[in-house]
Image (cartoon, rainbow, N blue to C red):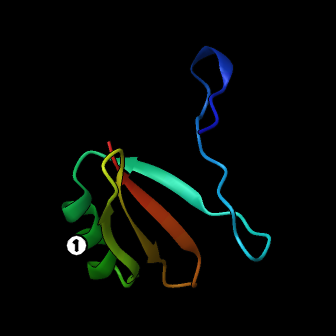
Amino acid sequence: MVQTPSGGPDGALIESETAGLTIGIVVPDLDKALEGATREGGAIAMPVVDNGWVKKAQVRDPAGNLLTLIQG
């Protein structure tokens, strides 16, 4: 996890085979956010994963951009 001072945006660094950037968005209700994303033309790229410390999923917007949705 990466934390910034004074309430700035926080994030995480993860290992990947290729370089890239994925935006993570904290949502109050992950299931509802996934429903909204697919209703608006997005597609689920990674179903809900709960690893014990975070519950998240990934969607692609209609343009193909990958977003991580994080239950918060």
- Looking at the rendered structure, the kind of residue marked 1 is Glu
Q: In screen coordinates, is 52 left or right of 69?
A: left
Residue at the outermost front position: 52
Specify the quadrant of the image occupied by residue 17: bottom right
Looking at this view, is 10 or 15 the one in front? 15
Q: In screen coordinates, is 60 left or right of 31?
A: right
Vertical position of residue 40 compared to residue 2: above or below: below
Vertical position of residue 12 compared to residue 42: above or below: above
Q: In screen coordinates, is 11 left or right of 32?
A: right
Give the residue at x 67% y 50%.
13
Instruction: State the SS at label 1.
Output: helix
Give the residue at x 48% y 78%.
61
Q: In screen coordinates, is 1 left or right of 28?
A: right
Q: Check the picture and name the quadrant holding the N terminus.
A: top right
Vertical position of residue 72 compared to residue 33: above or below: above
Vertical position of residue 37 compared to residue 72: above or below: below
Specify the quadrant of the image occupied by residue 15: bottom right
Looking at this view, is 71 or 49 the one in front? 49
Q: Where residue 68 appears, x then y in whole percent?
A: 47, 62
Q: Where residue 42 appears, x then y in whole percent?
A: 40, 81
Q: Where residue 39 appears, x then y in whole percent?
A: 26, 80
Q: How crowded is mark 1: few (under 14 residues within 10 Å), some or many (20 or more)?
A: few
Q: Check the picture and name the quadrant holding the C terminus.
A: top left
- Exactly how many numbered labels are in the figure? 1
Give the residue at x 59% y 76%.
65
Looking at this view, is 18 or 28 the one in front? 18
Give the residue at x 58% y 58%.
23
Residue that numbered label 1 is attached to: 35
